[in-house]
Amino acid sequence: MASLKYWLWLTTRRGLGAPGVLRVLDCFVTPERAFYAGPEDYALLEGLDGEALESLRDKDTGQADRILADCDSQGLRLLTLQDADYPERLRQIPAPPPVLYIRGRLPAFDEEAAVGVVGTRRPTAYGEQMAGRLGFELARGGALVVSGIARGLDTAALKGALKGGGTVVSVLGGGTDVYYPKENRWLYEDVAAAGALVSEHPPGTENRAAHFPVRNRIISGLCLGVAAVECGLHSGTMRTMEWVWEQDRDAFAVPGPVGAPMSEGPNRLIQQGAKLITCGEDILTEYRGRYPLRLPDPGPPEGEAGGPRPEPAAGPAPRPAPPPEREVVPLARQKERFTDDELAVLTALGEGRRSADELTELTGIPIRRVTTALTMLQVRSAVAEEPGRRFSALLRLEAGR
């Protein structure tokens, strides 16, 4: 904990940013040594302006102590550049973030087939459909989906990946506790439950326009490749793809109609060498050889393994089967399959459809735990989300005697 205090002191110095922090570490090796250095030692640093040098002379650790307390109260994990489990893939980019604030469970990125899906905040219906489809198919195929969490295509990709039952990571332009946009509050909760929210900014940091271009280097840095769905020629998405080229990552793009404003960016990327994709499998096939355990081969399409598909038998069409009875989970197995929170949510759902707020009121469980339970129940196909952010149970619990 003591060493973390010095990391937070260093990374909150004015005028440094990630490049300046790295210059200080190159000279002093650890933040603690930089903290105890004197003005004559700072004179050895090159490339820092007067504001940065003056800030290094300020030895007040009050801000660092407040950040540590906030992280503790919010259950955030701090990961520094010198920690062994810092993603090596990210460590190798120019100016990697010295400290990551993590809410949720950060996957072992160096073992994952991580793919970014990015695009405009103002998509067409086609773009929204494609982003959701890519997210779903990548997650269902075993990839880890990474995005921002802005409205538009970030949201569509993340929702698709969550429906696909995969692990997701969102890289933020502000603190993990600052919802932006505010209507994505529930998505923040779902992502934290199924993966992680990641930021290089401490709790309470507002999302500022200047943060996002810098944030985008982390999205590409964590991934093997990034797919652009829809965007203009001069956009944050295109800046992200510049990071992709600079970091030697793979570039993918979804083609669109010639002349359509939101397809100008992806079409240009394809001209520049990005792989044209129309589905998640177009990306998965690039990495299946490197990650065979993460990305299992789906096998030949239905009907191909045994030759031509058989002709349907003559005669009247069969009657549709009645809907299956909902599974009843025996009382003796309920504790094995579900946590206490999940059981409480399933009981409160009963035969009806309820919102997360209603479930919070009925169960008395805090909203964050309710949303976590709902996400995990959806992954296990025990709960379905319906229009209007309402939920229904797909199974029944045997009542106690």
Image: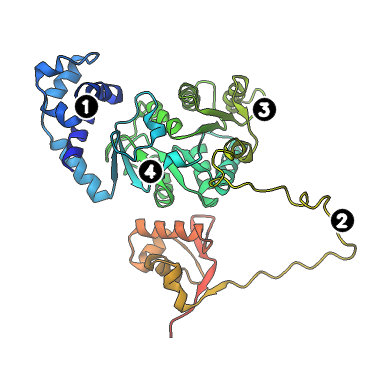
Residue 197's tag is 4
Q: Indicate the colouring scheme.
A: rainbow
Residue 29's tag is 1
| Comparing labels 2 and 1, the label whose residue is closer to the camera | 1
| Comparing labels 4 and 3, the label whose residue is closer to the camera | 4
- Which of the two discs, 2 and 1, labels the residue nearer the N terminus? 1
For badge 3, the amino acid type reads Pro
| Comparing labels 3 and 1, the label whose residue is closer to the camera | 1
Kind of element beneath mark 1: loop
Proximity of marks 2 and 1: CB atoms separated by less than 8 Å: no
| Comparing labels 2 and 3, the label whose residue is closer to the camera | 2
Q: CA distance from mark 3 to mark 1?
A: 52 Å
- Which of the two discs, 4 and 2, labels the residue nearer the N terminus? 4
| Comparing labels 4 and 2, the label whose residue is closer to the camera | 2
Kind of element beneath mark 2: loop
Comparing 346 with 278, the one in front is: 278
